[in-house]
Amino acid sequence: MAKRAIMIGIDGCHRDTLYRLIDEKQVPFFNWMADNGVRVKNAVTMFPSTTASCCATLYTGSWYRSHGLLNNEWVDRFADPPRGRSYIECLYEALLSFDKKLFGLPTILLPDRNEGGQINNDLCPDHPTIYEEMTAAGKISYTFFHYIGKGATVWARPARTDMLRYGMIEQYGKPYQMFDKMMATRAIRLMRKRPADLLAIYYGGNDGHSHRHGVPGQETYLRDFIDKELTRLKTALEAMFPQDELYWSVCADHGQSNLDKEKHLERCMWIEDFFPQLRAAGFEKMDRGLSRNELGGLDVIGTLGHGAGAGFYIKNRKTGDWKTPPDFASDIVPALNNFMKASAGLAPFGDYKFKGYLDFLLTRTRFDEPYRVYVNKPPYDAAGELVPLEEHFKGGDPAYVKPVERLRGIDSPKGPDIVLLLDYCENRFNINTVEGFHPGQHGSLCPDDSYVPMLFAGPGVIRGELPEAFTINWSPTVASMLGVKMPRADGAPLPIFGNGKGSAR
């Protein structure tokens, strides 16, 4: 068993870019990991592949349906009134997740709320974080610059200077390295002062850099910044502790796809682009389910949360109660059929701007049912069929990575009544803004978004490659390095000390 483990999270890291840099010997730290450990060939993240919910999986080892964070945006329809969650939609929401506010006492600027952080507070207590399991086992854990710190001995959030630098990045286009640059330094200082059994650090700037510059921009961020920072961290920790006490692991929350502005700008969609179909289905009051919005009086609540689709919560029009399942025939089917009509350019949507935008629709007739795919035929006037995921995806289309398992992961009573998937993988219809176009995007079932790097290194770790894993396996595997179990996680430890031939559950 290891005496100390280091978890390195890299937001939005594109697997093929990092693995190529390793294979080309361009990244000394990552090359050391590859030479002294094992990497997972096909490590698969959750769906939708979005930061808040994917990170909840990374640090609990559980599916979305278990830990309770369904997306970057979702709605608790059972609250009174319904309450939206939009964890990182803007600076205000990000500060809530870091348990901070913009102004107040005693520090005037960016004081602590001392409320736990909205992401931490929304995690289901039945599926503890790795930090909670460490604490229960009598071990010390630190986590740096991450939204999820529940149970950690020290949850080291970005300081005021870090957040001010982040503001400069967002408002004035400064490089994202400005935000991440002090994290390793602060971690080194704390480890010297009081060594921890588990140290988790998180490079959130990589995702922002890639949103801004596209997937090709990750090469410089990984090679010229993150690799150098991790080399510095490794050197400092090896000066404090014997090398046979240190175990290392790397993973990403999700991947990222590249969009071409010249080709794909006209395929950028937003929540308002779906409202005409809903109005034609007889709904009048609709809005986006942001945390700050009043939602109780609406008929439809839309959520974005990722770059490849949208979710819609539908009120039961007969009861007027959000806690009652909407009537499938009268409330859900008209909306589903209109989404299909608009995509096909059929009346009354013959002049719809985004013809061909739809990939598929998920829905259900009751809150406790699993999602199924809604299938219908033109002219989409009568009710269609609900097809089980296993049947719909039985052909093994390479455009989708582990679709059945990952879509099962969102089966929750708190999920949307309709999950709309854009034709993102093939034709790049995407959730984006024309004014603030992001050439890097994520959220889909396609390979670029779905595969993430996952590496483990240290004494006794096998050398080579494991065939596959899910991100639910990451925390249980790291915990196992320290002799700690995570029995309430959905994932199990990978065989990193075995023969390496097994597949993960």
Image (cartoon, grey):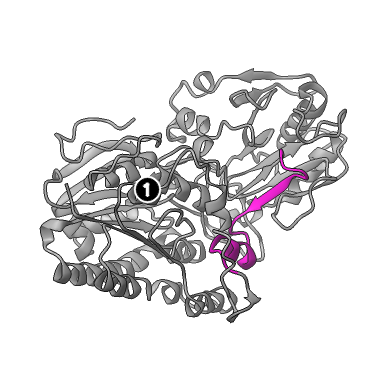
The quadrant the C terminus occupies is top left
Q: Using a 10 Å C-alpha cutoff, classify the residue at mark 1 as few (fewer than 14 neighbours), some (14 to 19) or many (20 or more).
A: many
Q: Which residue is mark 1?
A: 130
How many marks the image carries: the answer is: 1
Give 351 or 319, whichever is nearer the viewer: 319
Question: Does the magenta portion include 82?
Answer: yes
Query: Does 455 appear in magenta?
Result: no
Classify mark 1: helix, strand or loop: helix
Q: Is residue 138 left or right of residue 107?
A: left
Determine the residue positioned at 67% across, 27% down.
367
Please tell me whether residue 141 is drawn above or below residue 332 in the rendered image. below
Image-quadrant location for residue 69: top right
Query: From the viewer's perspective, is residue 284 above or below residue 337?
Result: below
* Range shown magenta: 78-100
User: Does residue 350 show up?
Assistant: no
Task: Pinpoint residue 41: horizontal percent, then vertical percent.
Answer: 27, 41
